């Protein structure tokens, strides 16, 4: 009996003295890859979180806006045209008119540039009849289109822009017409001829 008890006690002691096999998570990650079976192809994607946008529509051909008619207290659609040979001065003066309209509370419908016009200056030789081109002058034009300009404010507005008109810049104001709208685009006689042939 004593031998059996001793044998049991010895087995119990040896089992208690055995060190448990516990691996530290840091060392375990070094020896074994825990993320081996996890896919990583979707990491960093964020566009699926945004709301879906509607497909972009094709831009329609530019159409003429409706021309506002004059009333008893306000003008209709007016074109303030600025023209000159120096493009920088013309551009800055048109910007000044636009900013002045914003300060006075005048509604600006749109601002646009007209096609540049080229003028050839011809000279004749002293002894001869042949003409030769001396220089080419380019005329730059900008248009600030106003809508519903108050009749009481118009004299003050015109006085301010005339006093600040730079040298070499021509200023004109007139009512907007359909012909002014078509003058914005360059004529393409070759294309028009081809279209006419297709139409026939």
Image (cartoon, grey):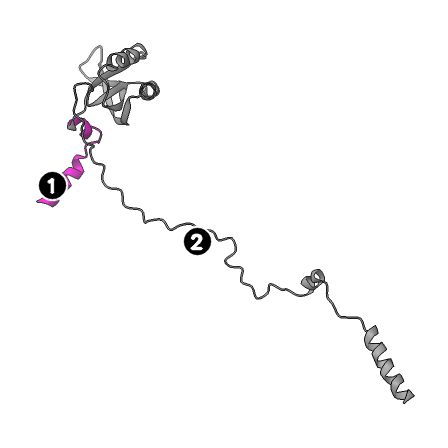
Q: Residue at x 28, y 46 (%)?
A: 57
Identify the image quadrant of residue 130: top left
Instruction: Tell me: residue 59, above or below residue 18.
Output: above
Determine if the magenta segment contains residue 4.
no
Residue 187 image offset from top left, x and y in percent: 19, 32
Which residue is labeled 2 in the image?
48
Instruction: Tell me: residue 31, above or below residue 198.
Output: below
Q: Which residues are magenta?
A: 179-200
Front-most of residues 26 and 126: 26
Q: Quadrant of the C terminus?
A: top left
Q: Residue at x 74, y 67 (%)?
A: 22
Which residue is labeled 1 in the image?
196
Determine if the magenta segment contains residue 183.
yes
Per the picture, the main secondary structure of the magenta-coloured stretch is: helix
Q: Residue at x 20, y 33 (%)?
A: 64
Residue 128 image offset from top left, x and y in percent: 19, 13
Q: Residue furthest left?
A: 200
> How many numbered marks have been drawn onto this rendered protein structure?
2
The alpha-carbon separation of the residues under discs 1 and 2 comes to 50 Å
Q: Earlier in the sequence, mark 1 or mark 2?
A: 2
Residue 152 image offset from top left, x and y in percent: 23, 14
Q: Which mark is residue 158?
A: none
Q: Quadrant of the N terminus?
A: bottom right
In this rendering, does residue 1 appear at all? yes
Mark 2 crowdedness (10 Å alpha carbons): few <14, some 14-19, many ≥20: few
Disc 1 vs disc 2: Cβ atoms closer than 8 Å?
no
With 150 as the anchor, is 11 left or right in this view?
right
Q: Residue furthest front?
A: 1
Q: Secondary structure at mark 2?
A: helix
């Amino acid at each position: 009996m004593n031998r059996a008890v001793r044998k049991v006690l010895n087995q119990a002691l040896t089992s208690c003295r055995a060190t448990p096999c516990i691996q530290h998570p840091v060392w375990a990650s070094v020896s074994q890859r825990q993320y081996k079976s996890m896919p990583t192809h979707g990491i960093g994607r964020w566009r699926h979180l945004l709301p879906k946008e509607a497909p972009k529509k094709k831009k329609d051909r530019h159409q003429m806006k409706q021309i506002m008619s004059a009333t008893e207290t306000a003008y209709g659609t007016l074109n303030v045209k600025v023209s000159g040979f120096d493009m920088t001065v013309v551009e800055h003066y048109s910007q000044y008119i636009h900013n002045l309209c914003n300060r006075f509370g005048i509604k600006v419908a749109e601002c646009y540039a007209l096609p540049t016009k080229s003028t050839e200056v011809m000279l004749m030789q002293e002894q001869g009849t042949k003409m030769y081109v001396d220089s080419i002058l380019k005329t730059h034009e900008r248009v600030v289109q106003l809508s519903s300009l108050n009749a009481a404010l118009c004299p003050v507005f015109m006085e301010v822009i005339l006093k600040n008109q730079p040298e070499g810049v021509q200023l004109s104001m007139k009512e907007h017409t359909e012909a002014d709208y078509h003058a914005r685009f360059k004529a393409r006689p070759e294309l028009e001829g081809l279209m006419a042939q297709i139409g026939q």
